[in-house]
Image: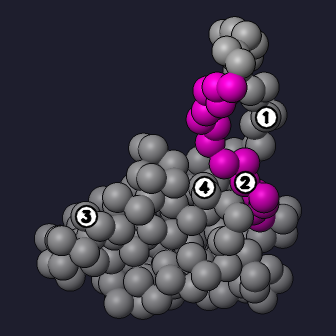
Amino acid sequence: MMIRIALLFLFASLAACRSLLSPERPPQPAPEPASSATPAGAAPPAVSTPPTPTRQYRLGSAATALVAQAHSRAAAGDYPAATATLERALRIEPENPLAWIELGRVQLASGNSAQADHMGHKALGLASGDPNAQAAAWRLIADSLRVRGRNEEASSATAHADLLVPH
């Protein structure tokens, strides 16, 4: 049963990782207002635009290669080797929240949900300015809470993630 849960989280994390490792999308132009005519004395209508990220984290080529190796090792059930590989990636990019999220996903898949929660919080602290990285960290935290039966807190963490980047 634990192996099935671990594999479920591993496959979910691989899907989440794929979105983190995808190439950066070009910025989309803001929509033009329907009419520029504003009655005298009236305030112009508020235009709601999502906040522009001040930073978008990406893994460098060496860390990306190590993450790919870790995914293979974790998929084979060799969580200690996957962990060691991700720790190497963290020595290369210790301030990159994506590397911490990857390590947290492996910890979660190996049954160490408390450590996964710690990794998610570490990533969250490093991910300032990047809503995608912040949302991934919140989702890791939510998954680690859910495994421990803390469903209300997990729902709250998922809500934080969905506010940053709707799922």
Give how far apart the Cα atoms at labels 2 and 4 are.
9 Å
Instruction: Name the residue that disc number 4 marks.
Output: 132
Give how far apart the Cα atoms at labels 1 and 3 are.
31 Å
Residue 43, x across and y down, in percent: 65, 30
> For residue 4, which quarter of the picture?
bottom left
Q: Which secondary structure lies at badge 3?
A: helix
Q: Earlier in the sequence, mark 2 or mark 4?
A: 2
Which amino acid is tagged 3? Ser
Foreground disc of the pair 2, 4: 2
Residue 117, x across and y down, in percent: 41, 83
Q: Earlier in the sequence, mark 4 or mark 1?
A: 1
Give how far apart the Cα atoms at labels 4 and 1 are.
14 Å
Instruction: Name the residue that disc number 1 marks.
Output: 27
Give how far apart the Cα atoms at labels 3 and 2 are.
24 Å
Q: Earlier in the sequence, mark 1 or mark 3?
A: 1
Which amino acid is tagged 1? Pro
Image vertical order of residue 141 relative to residue 91, above or below: above
Magenta: main secondary structure equals: loop
Q: Which residues are magenta?
A: 41-59
- The answer to whether residue 80 is seen in the rendering is yes
Give how far apart the Cα atoms at labels 1 and 2 are.
10 Å
Instruction: Name the residue that disc number 3 marks.
Output: 155
